[in-house]
Amino acid sequence: MNRLRLLVVLSVLSIIGILIMQAVWVRSAYTLRERQFRQSAFIALQDVADEVARLNQFTLNRYAVTQLSADYFIVNTDAPIDPVTLETLIQRSLQQHNLITDYEYGIYDCETDRMVYGAYVSTNGKAGQSSRVLPTFPRYTYYFGIRFPNQSLFVAGQLSGWLWSTLVVLLVVLFFGYTLIVVLRQRRLTEVQRDFIHNITHELQTPVSTIRIAADVLQSDLIIDQPARLKQYARIVMEESLRLQKQVSNVLRLARTNQTGFRLTCSDVDLHALMRAAASTFAPYVTLDLRAAEGRVWADPYHLETALTNLIDNAIKYSQPTPAVVLHTHIDKGRLVWSVSDTGIGIDPVYHKAVFHQFFRVPTGHTPTATGFGLGLYYVQQVVRAHRWQLSLSSSPGQGSSFTICERAGTRSHSTSRPAPTSAPLSLPQP
């Protein structure tokens, strides 16, 4: 177990390291490509400025390009320029430097102190009116401004190899993670199977051994002359047979439920009547606190009674040597709420979710009489889910446990308004 945990921790750390390194590499590659784009744009625009100077028959004595932001450049021309000529020069220079991306530009007019002409040029060669006002620059008299609105997309497009490698790494990580989950799940299933075999072996071996011993005694010729002893061993055989039958029925019922789901045959059920009958069956350990004006619920009578019996049986088993179980009902916001509470050993909050898992048994705090397969609370949760009720657990070590079940909102009504009983299969999710 420790080796598996170490493997999981190292695997998770390795995955995190791979993702971090890949992110750093992609970020570095993007920054490098972005810098290359700006340098190429600077050189291309400088070539445009030189060409404009050549057309006007003068020579620029300094660099003509000034970058005002990440995607906006100002290019000094020192002379007026025709917009059509300028666009042609920009297009040609950008293509020569492999900057095939959309751009928008504007020409500054010193008389009006604004960009008098602006156009948006897309990669398909079509030009349109610029959609925004380009900022002016007070240091130059004759210049034009140019913006690359899709610079980020253009740079990202240059990283296709990196992006594909990142995608491959992510796929590898996902497959590895899925494989790890499958391995852990299989290990969990193996542990569940081992615990189940251990529990069922213990639970079935005890009544079988008792029946075998009682049968040996009953085969004795002397037992006929001892009617009281004969009756006692016959009673033992009957009790252990019923116990064995109950355990087998629990396993078969669970197998049937997992394969076909619950088949609910709902009707109007008097929960108070079920609780009174249960209190009589488990007397003197069970007391009633029925505060609800009425305890009628729309439910499957068999599953509801079995779930109630399982909760009471669990409460008694874990409350030895003096069990004290309370069955409580009340109405909260129009909904019937009922609970089964005890003063037993309690359950640590760490196990509050796990106790509803199939075959789970709390690893500490069991009393010698607390036996079973770990199916009782799992079955109760499945019944609650099948009826779409709400189940909650309140418990702490040494403070007892309280299992509370609440109806859905809006289901409180008289039985005369309920629909006719139906029988329909319901597939239940595994916990």
Image (tube, grey):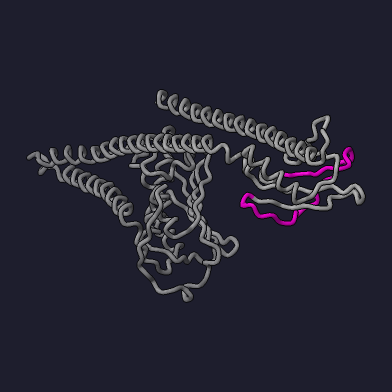
Q: Is residue 397 visible?
A: no
Determine whether 50 is above or below 238 in the image: above
Left or right relative to 207: residue 422: right
- Which one is in front, 353 or 222? 353
Image quadrant holding the N terminus, namely top left
* Foreground residue among 370 and 129: 129
Q: Which residue extends farthest bottom?
A: 416
Residue 232: x and y in percent read 21, 44
| Residue 361 in the image, given as x and y percentages of width and height | 39, 38
Q: From the viewer's perspective, tell me whether residue 244 is left or right of residue 113.
A: left
Which residue in the rendered view is the most extreme toward the left?
A: 221
Q: Is residue 184 left or right of residue 13?
A: left
Whole-percent x, y for residue 116 in the image? 84, 52
**Image quarter for residue 157?**
top right
| Magenta-highlighted residues | 123-147
At 64% from the left and 38% from the top, the residue drawn is 96
- Above or below residue 142? Residue 303 is below
Above or below, 430 against 188 in this view is below
Residue at figure coordinates x 38%, y 71% from the top left: 421
Residue at 57%, 29% (x, y): give it: 25
Q: Is residue 24 magenta?
A: no
Q: Residue 386: horizontal and vertical position, in percent? A: 42, 58
Residue sitting at 52 percent across and 71 percent down? 413
Is 168 displayed left or right of 100 in the figure? Answer: left
Foreground residue among 114 and 260: 114
